[in-house]
Amino acid sequence: MENIQGKIILDNTEYKTNLTKNYLNGKQYKKINSQEIRAFIPGTIRSIFVKEKDSVKKGDELLILEAMKMKNRIFAPVDGKIKKVYVNIEERVAKNQILIELE
Amino acid sequence: MSITQRILDFFKKKSQIIEEVENQAKTKQEKMGKMTARQRIESLLDKDTFHEYDLFVEHKAEDFGMDKKFLPGDGVITGTGKILGFPVCIYAQDFTVAGGSLGLAHARKITKIMDHALNLGIPLIGINDSGGARIQEGVNSLAGYGEIFFRNTRASGVIPQISVILGPCAGGAVYSPALTDFVFVVNKISKMFITGPEVIKTVLGEEISMEDLGGARVQAEISGNAHFYADTEFECFEQIKKLVTFIPWNNRKKADTFPIKPPKSIKTISTIMPKDNTEPYDVRDIIKAIADDSDFFEIQQFWADNIVIGFLRIQGETIGVVANQPMVLAGVLDVDSSDKAARFIRFCDSFNIPLLTLVDLPGYLPGIDQEHSGVIRHGAKILYAYSEATVLKITVIMRKAYGGGYIAMCSRHLGADFVFAWPMAEIAVMGPEGAANIIFKKEIEGAENPDEMRKLKVQEYTEKFANPYKAASAGYVDAVINPEETREYIIHALQIGINKQVENPKRKHGIPPF
């Protein structure tokens, strides 16, 4: 339960202070790229309905990701063309793993 | 059967359940480095004060061979006793009887002692050591949990509720402690989680040990679920005993008054405070300089430690203190510290414990992580808790009180009864550096030497606004005081405010930003 020495800058003023584990482990922000379809939950890919170079419309079903005994249907968030399919059927995927990339 | 025979028969029946079970339990629990349920109750309570009830309760489950299983006491010991003379209702789950699993009879023993505690207006202590729901009893086991949660909630704010985690506490079982006021954990023994490492591995493919997932340290430092952390069960019981002395039996009473002891801290407040207002110090030294016997009983010491909360006594009376901690994250308010303070404020308000707020913070913590984690929603909790609290509220502005942080830390505007400020106090919308850059933007940018001009303007702002007198001239601060007089001013405020009676508007309940 040791804190790490550091500093915090607020309104142009630098404060000498210790930093907590939770502060240092805070989530790094990443901009959402709607052309990258990522697993929102860890699970298993059950079906893939598209292949590379297919054109898809917003709302088209891309694949089924089963997690917590639920078959989640993943839809295209935007119109586009399938640039790459990163996963295979029956593959187990981690949370935030890239599944399909659109262009 | 003669009377003597019947009495002898009773002794035999009782010893069958108590002694035989206890002997087996000792061997099993010792192997895991744990005390037995009975040993725990006996070491926590005053000698020979424990009275056990429902010793002969048996389960009525029939499925999966349960009809042939005799579970002594159905895996939980319940009763009443005293801690340092304070009456309590207590239960302790026995891990050596069917893994301490919760069946309906087990749950009903607990709910019965909970009803008792609520009706009698005395604290409830639950010692948890259980593998979880008794699967053979199906939905009846879930019913048992639900009935416990319902009572935890009904009793919340009426009687103090204490949970001691002395073994696994998994799945639904964790929610009873989560609903209670104080959770105690012990290193290597306590484990709390909703889903264990096994499930996490099979479902999510993530590997983690039980200790790293929900061990005592994690609950005390990362999640904030635990309020007190100890290295041994013995140390944990000492902590519970100390806590009990600070709190009243129920919400209709006041905490006991103790003999008055002056602070023994040799450091004066002016020597604790650094010269430079961006230098840190340990606010607990200030608390100790004010407290009777310099005795400060800290709560959630290891989690969100940018705010310090806990109990102390002043002139023998229990006070709840909320203090910004400049030593950690500059004492800012953030998601976790707002949560921590808000819950504590509500505890004190429910149980008639006056609140002392010590202010020194540069504001709320900026950052994407904070914003996306809901610092608005969480930060609002502290505003809500202070505004709602009707106990005596005393605020001391020690150093920085900037912007939203000034308002949130029990300002006059949120209903503080007494607001004192030290001469070093800086009460303003923001620190001089930030403020000067905004107010004098044109002057600074247009100057021949902008850096020189900035310095000049920062100084100008500091002299004009970074002090307690603007707030004092508006009446927002009642008195600017010498730091060394702080204890005396608090004592006077407590004496004057002893009969404070303020009622919130009549309503079913408010809707805090949970």
Image: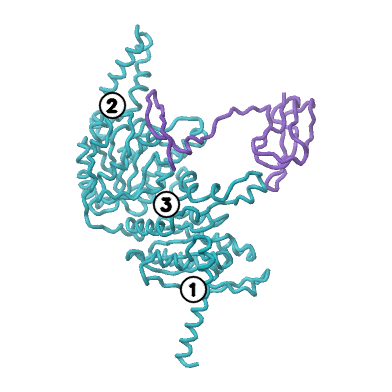
Residue at left 47%, top 86%?
A: B8
- Return the disc, 2 or 3, that comes first in the chain's sequence: 3
Q: CA distance from mark 2 to mark 3?
A: 38 Å
| Callout in the foreground (1, 3) | 3
Dot 3: element: strand
Question: What is the chain letter for disc 3?
Answer: B
Disc marking residue B306: none
Disc marking residue B466: 2
Q: Is residue B60 above or below residue B314?
A: below
Q: Which residue is mark 3?
A: B228
- Name the residue at the bottom extreme: B2
Say yes or no: labels 2 and 1 on the same chain: yes
Q: Position of residue A46 (x, y in %)?
A: 76, 41
User: Chain A, which colour?
Assistant: purple
Say yes or no: labels 2 and 3 on the same chain: yes
The quadrant the C terminus of chain A occupies is: top right
- Return the disc, 1 or 3, that comes first in the chain's sequence: 1
Q: CA distance from mark 1 to mark 3?
A: 30 Å
Q: Position of residue B371 (x, y in %)?
A: 49, 33
Q: Say if residue B290 shows up in the picture.
A: yes
Question: What is the chain letter for disc 2?
Answer: B
Q: Nearer the viewer, residue A2 or B410?
A: A2
Query: On the picture, is B137 further left or further right than B291?
Result: right
Crowding around mark 2 (Cα neighbors within 10 Å: few <14, some 14 to 19, many 20+) is many
Any idea which chain is the cyan one in this picture? B
Dot 1: element: loop
Q: Amino acid at mark 2?
A: Ala
Q: Amino acid at mark 3?
A: Phe
Say yes or no: labels 1 and 3 on the same chain: yes
Q: Position of residue B171 (x, y in %)?
A: 57, 54
